[in-house]
Amino acid sequence: MMIKAVLILLCVFLVEAQYAVPQDLGYGIPNPYQYSYSSPAIGGSSSHQESGDGTGRVTGSYSVVDEDGRSRTVEYVADELGFRANIVTNEPGTSNQAPADVTISSSADDGFGGVYAAPAPVPVPVAAVPVGGLPYGGLPYAAA
């Protein structure tokens, strides 16, 4: 009889626990913030700046410059509408695109004048080979 009472109390506790109110974790209201840095380096430099307004909106940018002149600057916003970025670069292999709320503006010389189009497929003729003419008789190698 005691075991039944314990099991009933345990079930009631488990049912009540799933409806418990989450505790305040003490994070409080977000505070506005701002930071930045600029770091010259051997053969290049980098910088980053970011600010948050205390309501969840974050804006910022970062840039990287290599010794060979390649550069990338990213400006971004994160808010109730999601993350969005604008990228300006001259890195080889890049082109002007706009995937997934990101705008890429490239001045790289990719050999196509900044515009890339995939070449049209070229049909390749295939010679007909009779099955019996194959050195292994047209059967899988494992067959003997």
Image (spheres, rainbow, N blue to C red):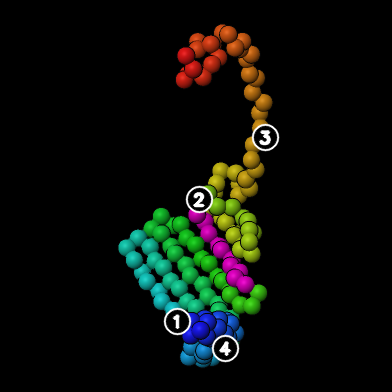
Q: Which residue is mark 1?
A: 35
**Whole-Å distance between the Cαs marked 4 and 2?**
54 Å
State the CA–CA distance, disc 2 to disc 1. 31 Å
The mark closer to the camera, 2 or 1, is 1
- Residue under label 3, please give it: 120
Which residue is nearer to you in this view: 143 or 70? 143
Instruction: Using the rendered image of the protein, determine whether residue 53 is visible from the camera's viewpoint.
Output: no
Query: From the viewer's perspective, is the residue at label 2 or at label 3 nearer?
Result: 3
Marks 3 and 1, how far apart in space? 49 Å
Outermost front residue: 1
Q: Counting residues from the N terminus, which is met first, the one under dot 2 or under dot 3?
A: 2
* Distance in Å between CA atoms under marks 2 and 3: 23 Å
x then y, percent, for residue 95 = 59, 52
- Report the front residue among 128 and 111: 128
Depth check: 5 or 129 in front? 5
As measured in the structure, the alpha-carbon distance from the residue carrying label 4 to the one carrying label 3 is: 61 Å
Label 3 sits on a secondary structure element that is loop
Where is residue 116 drawn, in percent x and y? Answer: 62, 45
Q: From the top left corner, tell me how far across and down residue 61 is, in percent.
A: 51, 72
The Cα atoms of the two marked residues, 1 and 4, are separated by: 36 Å
The residue sitting at 53% across, 75% down in the picture is 60
Please give the residue where the numbered disc 2 appears in the rendered image.
92
**Foreground residue among 144 and 127:** 144
